[in-house]
Image: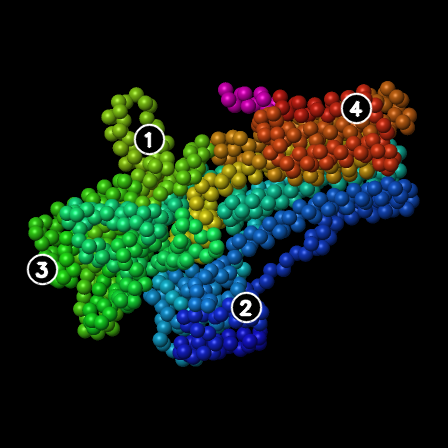
């Protein structure tokens, strides 16, 4: 099949075809999908499934771009002319320095470009495809016509496809047709050729999203041949936007450049008036301009941001929207999902409860089927009852546990012989493991009781129901339901007792159903009593931090299995018989406890938002320390009995349920939101209300989410954080950051990284600007005063290379400061100059005064007319400025902590760069051939001592300022 065939395929009227025809044309198999080899060949023939290939900038383009700066071009031309008419060596040296500086710029930009490329790879959309009969995740770009893929709510359709199977599948096609009402997709129907796009119910179109249900489809058009490709679509993935800080940095850079250029121009006019040669003055003043203009500022900012973002991605926090990095540093509250984010999300059924007060413990860990249900003799729980419970758990379930034999020669008896691969929702996997412990295998049960219908689980309904045929008995149907205890109970009208035998259970009939819609019992008939007992068992389990689910069941008879499709969802989920409750543990992630403690010292509130029961949520919140700040608010004077009463009250006040939230106005919620640490039984729309209330109170909100309906809340938050593993494509696209490991602790590391990046931006801002301002003061003063040039053009350019280059970049890599998570979040409006003005004024003055004084002193001592004196004065000033900057770089490692308090060698790049620069300068100043090229002379021990002592003045000034400021802060 070739590219032309691809176009031909896309032109077929797929909506007019039947499933068998579609599969035949595409030469693929409904269940097996394509074979790997075939898919590879088709990818080579059809090309990748992408709408628009973004042009990548080659290394040569990036290198050439470095020379496009007008100043650099002018400098090269002026130097070339001066080389012809005068000093060729000088011209060569200047060009060599420019090329070196260009290489530094190039390396930086190339690294950023690579980092962005890698980020784009990480954010590439994936889809679930069937190849060789196996389900696997594939980058959307690798899809080819003939591929069979699976979709469910929240997925984006990856290519134009023919629908093979649908379970209540609905898609939103607004992106393509503009119609925002979801379209129900169906199989088994064909449509006339002229039917418009929007009505082709058996076709799925790329870019549209699944809003409900699930389905399986076969691709017939990819990339530019899809409907979207035809109308030229959007490119998704990471958005490379400038952060507000970066934009401010750019304009600051521009302003400073204009000032520096103005000064350089004035200096050159004065110089010419003072009798310097025009060409000499031109090269000199352009060199000054090149050195003084902080052209590296935006580039270094961009590089340190992208490299920081890349580093974050390697730690599992993938930034999709660059401004988020900045917002991270200002975050004041993180609202996090519980299950799988604060907890491990690896659940294990621990306890079962059956009416009335009959319970059993379940042993084993993780998802391993090893373990058993400990039913004591006389506990009143029959094995038949357990099997029915397990059957419900396994059949009303979409997860799979796959077991594989461990391979390899080193198999040892103490290593488990079987490894377990799990697919699906952790709650459901736990239920499957439980069923296995009872001895029930899902695959066998599925074969014996094929599923014929389902009402899917959604966070809103908190329920799931499946309908099964009983193999071999025509018209016999079984309905299994599981879900939140309150929801299931509301749909039960009978109870199955745990001591029933199979026959008795199969005979559940109307004698068990004495009421409608409420649970009743055949012996005491008091519905409230029964309900209360079950709810109280539920509360006991929830208070112990268990995630609790109820299971229910009913038998139905229908005249034919088609009739079941006529029963409404509501009728299916009514008149059920309550089976029991299962309680599962979901251990807290150990690293989360520390991360939450870190948030507290960093002035960030952590709020738990969960669909789970209030008591479960509170128990987990207590364990991981979310309630600690609230509970610790007491003054420590009350008695322990009073304290525990108060603590319970405080804790209760810290929690709000979805129902309570519904009853509150947005204003009332805004009042409560400050004290509330736990939101339970929430629906996705509540998340939006919570974000809005927090924002109203001036918070900068980070909010996590995974489901499709979380998307509006994620968009409304200052930072929307999507789950990388459990999150849907739509949720990820609505977010500004994706957690590759779904782990809360990763958010805190990202906040830390965000703070560090912005600390570091300030560090090299100070470093670069002080050097530039200092140099321009020195040179402007000397020329204006009619002194000889304290530095030649090549000296200026070399100093620029030595300081703007590696030390500045290295400062961008400085590790986080010790107190990075011990200070309050940065106000979003905070200027990039806040807290550093003192440095920007003090350091250039010290640099200028020491350099000019030294220059003046050496000339005074040795005679203003002496060539040797001038060369010596220049040599000393050259050495002074460079070593001043190198010492100052050490101080810039922290703008608040004294240098000796920081780990000495934690920034290896800075260590190498300081050593490298020092060796280079010492060589230039002492190695005769280089000395000659740079027109420098030997210095004796006294000269060196003076240079080095003066070079430390900036460092000493900064260290004193930091010590004083820090002491004041402590007081
Ligand atoms: P979080 O928002 O912290 O991730 P959650 O995962 O508990 O919380 P949901 O998945 O919305 O939130 O679940 C809400 C409730 O629905 C659960 O407490 C449970 O009672 C029930 N539930 C969860 N998963 C299923 C399922 N697969 N089938 C039936 N009911 C379920």
Mark 3, residue position: 511
Q: Residues within 10 Å of mark 2 (few under 14, many from 20)?
A: some
Q: Is residue 532 above or below residue 632?
A: below
Mark 4, residue position: 944
Q: Quadrant of residue 165?
A: bottom left
Q: CA distance from mark 3 to mark 4?
A: 105 Å
Label 3 vs label 2, nearer the camera: 2
Q: Which residues are magenta?
A: 961-971
Are the residues flagged by discs 1 and 3 in contact, CB closer than 8 Å? no
Are the residues flagged by discs 1 and 2 in contact, CB closer than 8 Å? no
Counting residues from the start of the chain, the first of labels 3 and 2 encountered is 2
Specify whether residue 208 is in view: no
Q: Which mark is residue 40?
A: 2
Q: CA distance from mark 1 to mark 3?
A: 51 Å
Q: CA distance from mark 2 to mark 4?
A: 68 Å
Q: Residues within 10 Å of mark 3 (few under 14, many from 20)?
A: few
Q: Quadrant of residue 598?
A: top left
Mark 1, residue position: 631
Counting residues from the start of the chain, the first of labels 2 and 4 encountered is 2
Counting residues from the start of the chain, the first of labels 1 and 3 encountered is 3
Q: Which mark is residue 312?
A: none
Q: Residue at x 55, y 23 (%)?
A: 966
Counting residues from the start of the chain, the first of labels 3 and 4 encountered is 3
Q: Residue at x 46, y 33 (%)?
A: 602
Percent position of residue 630, x then y = 34, 32
Q: Quadrant of residue 666?
A: top left
Q: Residue at x 77, y 21 (%)?
A: 945
Label 1 vs label 2, nearer the camera: 2
Which secondary structure lies at badge 1? helix
Q: Residues within 10 Å of mark 4 (few under 14, many from 20)?
A: some
Percent position of residue 96, x then y = 80, 44
Are the residues flagged by discs 3 and 2 in contact, CB closer than 8 Å? no
């Amino acid at each position: 099949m070739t590219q032309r065939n691809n176009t031909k395929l896309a032109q077929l009227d797929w909506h007019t075809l039947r499933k068998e025809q579609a599969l035949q044309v595409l030469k693929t198999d409904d269940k097996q999908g394509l074979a790997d080899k075939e898919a590879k060949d088709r990818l080579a023939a059809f090309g990748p499934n992408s709408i628009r290939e973004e042009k990548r900038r080659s290394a040569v383009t990036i290198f050439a771009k470095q020379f496009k700066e007008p100043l650099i071009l002018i400098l090269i031309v002026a130097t070339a002319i001066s080389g012809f008419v005068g000093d060729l060596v000088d011209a060569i040296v200047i060009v060599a320095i420019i090329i070196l500086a260009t290489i530094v710029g190039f390396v930086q930009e190339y690294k950023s470009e690579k980092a962005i490329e890698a980020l784009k790879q990480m954010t590439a959309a994936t889809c679930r495809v069937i190849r060789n009969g196996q389900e696997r995740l594939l980058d959307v770009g690798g899809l080819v016509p003939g591929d069979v893929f699976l979709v469910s709510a929240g997925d984006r359709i990856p290519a134009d496809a023919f629908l093979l199977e649908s379970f209540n599948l609905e898609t939103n096609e607004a992106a393509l047709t503009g119609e925002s009402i979801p379209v129900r997709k169906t199989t088994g129907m064909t449509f006339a050729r002229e039917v418009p796009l929007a009505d082709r119910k058996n076709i799925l179109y790329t870019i549209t999203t699944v809003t409900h249900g699930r389905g399986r489809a076969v691709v017939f058009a990819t990339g530019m041949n899809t409907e979207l490709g035809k109308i030229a679509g959007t490119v998704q993935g990471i958005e490379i936007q400038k952060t507000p800080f970066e934009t401010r940095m750019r304009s600051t850079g521009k302003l400073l450049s204009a000032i520096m250029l103005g000064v350089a121009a004035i200096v050159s006019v004065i110089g010419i008036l003072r009798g310097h040669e025009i060409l000499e003055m031109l090269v000199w003043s352009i060199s000054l301009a090149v050195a003084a203009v902080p052209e590296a500022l935006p580039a270094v900012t961009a590089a340190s941001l992208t490299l920081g973002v890349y580093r974050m991605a390697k730690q599992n926090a993938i930034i999709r929207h660059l401004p988020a990095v900045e917002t991270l540093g200002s975050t004041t509250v993180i609202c996090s999902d519980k299950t799988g984010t604060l907890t491990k999300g690896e659940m294990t059924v621990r306890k079962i409860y059956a009416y009335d007060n009959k319970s059993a413990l379940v042993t084993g860990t993780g998802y391993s089927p090893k373990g058993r249900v400990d039913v004591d003799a006389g506990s009143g729980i029959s094995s038949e009852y357990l099997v029915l419970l397990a059957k419900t758990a396994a059949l009303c379930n979409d997860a799979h546990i796959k077991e594989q034999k461990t391979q390899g020669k080193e198999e040892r008896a103490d290593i488990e012989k079987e490894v377990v691969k799990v697919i699906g929702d952790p709650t459901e996997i736990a239920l499957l493991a439980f069923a296995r412990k009872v001895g029930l295998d899902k695959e066998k049960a599925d074969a014996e009781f094929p599923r014929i219908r389902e009402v899917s689980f959604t966070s809103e309904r908190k329920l799931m129901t499946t309908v099964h045929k009983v193999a071999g008995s025509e018209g016999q149907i079984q309905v299994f339901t599981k879900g939140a205890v309150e929801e299931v109970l509301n749909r039960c009208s009978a109870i199955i007792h745990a001591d029933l035998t199979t026959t008795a259970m199969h005979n559940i009939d109307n004698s068990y159903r004495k009421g409608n819609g409420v649970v009743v019992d055949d012996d005491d008939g008091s519905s409230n009593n029964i309900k209360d007992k079950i709810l109280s068992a539920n509360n006991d389990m929830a208070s112990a931090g268990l995630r609790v689910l109820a299971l229910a069941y009913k038998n139905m008879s229908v005249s034919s299995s088609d009739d079941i499709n006529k029963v409404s969802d509501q009728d299916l989920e009514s008149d059920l018989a309550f089976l029991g409750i299962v309680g599962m543990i979901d251990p807290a992630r150990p690293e989360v406890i520390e991360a939450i403690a870190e948030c507290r010292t960093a002035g960030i509130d952590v709020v738990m938002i969960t669909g789970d029961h209030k008591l479960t949520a509170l128990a987990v919140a207590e364990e991981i320390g979310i309630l600690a700040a609230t509970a610790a608010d007491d003054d420590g004077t009350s008695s322990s009995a009073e304290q525990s009463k108060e603590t319970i009250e405080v804790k209760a006040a810290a929690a709000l349920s979805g129902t309570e939230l519904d009853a509150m106005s947005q204003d009332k919620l805004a009042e409560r939101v400050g004290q509330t640490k736990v939101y339970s039984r929430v629906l996705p729309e509540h998340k939006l209300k919570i974000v809005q209330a927090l924002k109203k109170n001036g918070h900068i909100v980070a909010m996590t989410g995974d489901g499709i309906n979380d998307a509006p809340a994620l968009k409304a938050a200052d930072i929307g954080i999507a789950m990388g593993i459990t999150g849907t494509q739509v949720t990820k696209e609505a977010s500004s950051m994706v957690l590759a490991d779904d782990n809360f602790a990763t958010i805190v590391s990202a906040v830390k990284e965000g703070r560090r990046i912005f600390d570091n931006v300030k560090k090299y801002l100070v470093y670069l600007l002080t050097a530039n301002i200092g140099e321009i003061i020195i040179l402007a003063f000397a020329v204006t005063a009619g002194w000889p040039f304290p530095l030649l053009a090549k000296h200026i350019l070399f100093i620029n290379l030595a300081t703007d280059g590696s030390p500045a970049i290295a400062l961008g890599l400085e590790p986080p400061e010790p107190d990075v998570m011990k200070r309050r979040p940065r106000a979003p409006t905070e200027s990039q100059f806040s807290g550093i003005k003192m440095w920007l004024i003090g350091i250039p003055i010290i640099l200028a005064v020491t350099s000019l004084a030294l220059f003046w002193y050496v000339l005074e001592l040795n005679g203003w007319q002496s060539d040797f004196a001038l060369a010596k004065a220049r040599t000393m000033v050259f050495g002074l400025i460079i070593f001043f900057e190198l010492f100052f770089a050490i101080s810039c490692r922290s703008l608040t902590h004294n240098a000796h308090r920081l780990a000495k060698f934690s920034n290896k790049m800075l260590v190498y760069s300081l050593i490298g620069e020092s060796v280079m300068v010492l060589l230039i100043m002492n190695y005769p051939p280089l000395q000659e090229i740079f027109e420098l002379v030997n210095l004796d021990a006294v000269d060196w001592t003076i240079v080095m002592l003066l070079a430390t003045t900036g460092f000493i000034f900064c260290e004193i300022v930091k010590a004083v400021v820090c002491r004041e802060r402590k007081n």
